[in-house]
Image (spheres, rainbow, N blue to C red):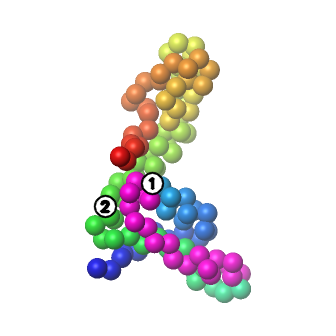
């Protein structure tokens, strides 16, 4: 079985961040192209991009995880007012940063731990 290309990034940092999240969810990720990244500017930039490759059966789970991450990022841009102290909190916080009260669960991130 051959791996499929899942994503392409311009920097090693971006690629490694997503690879770490995917691996943390139990997916097998192969990172390709890191060795060419230092040559950016010396060779065409598209040749230095970093690729993430997955097994075909893992691609759908990876897409779902990326979608959840995007939703969490959007929630972080929103502000939630604490019901107790009325302090503003990023939408992806679980607890009020000021008083520690549990914030409404409808705005919490939906990422889940892998057992």
Q: Which residues are magenta?
A: 22-41
Residue bearing the label numbered 2:
60
Circle 1 SS class: helix
Judge whether residue 37 can be spotted in this image.
yes
x%, y% of residue 43? 66, 87
Judge whether residue 88 can be spotted in this image.
no
Task: Decide: few, some or many residues near mark 1? Use Cα within 10 Å; few <14, some 14-19, many ≥20.
Answer: few
In whole angstroms, how far apart are the C-alphas of marks 1 and 2? 16 Å
Left or right of 16? Residue 24 is left
| Location of residue 113 with respect to 53 vertically, above or below | above
The quadrant where residue 34 appears: bottom right
x%, y% of residue 6? 41, 69
Residue at 62 percent across and 20 percent down: it is: 98
Residue at 33 percent across and 58 percent down: it is: 61
Viewer-closest of 38 and 68: 38
Find out whether residue 89 is within the magenta segment.
Answer: no
Circle on res. 16:
none
The quadrant where residue 90 appears: top right
Find out whether residue 32 is within the magenta segment.
Answer: yes
Residue at 59 percent across and 17 percent down: it is: 99
Residue at 55 percent across and 78 percent down: it is: 33
Residue bearing the label numbered 1:
24
Circle 2 SS class: helix
Q: Residue furthest right?
A: 42
């Amino acid at each position: 079985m051959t791996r499929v290309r899942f994503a392409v990034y311009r920097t090693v940092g971006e690629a490694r961040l997503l690879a770490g999240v995917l691996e943390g969810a139990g997916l097998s990720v192969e990172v390709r192209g890191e060795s060419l990244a230092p040559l950016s500017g010396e060779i065409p930039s598209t040749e230095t991009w970093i690729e993430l490759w997955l097994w075909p059966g893992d691609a759908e789970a990876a897409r779902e995880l990326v979608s959840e991450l995007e939703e969490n990022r959007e929630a972080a841009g929103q502000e939630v007012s604490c019901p107790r102290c009325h302090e503003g909190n990023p939408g992806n916080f679980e607890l009020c940063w000021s008083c520690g009260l549990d914030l409404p669960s409808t705005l919490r991130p939906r990422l889940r731990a892998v057992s």
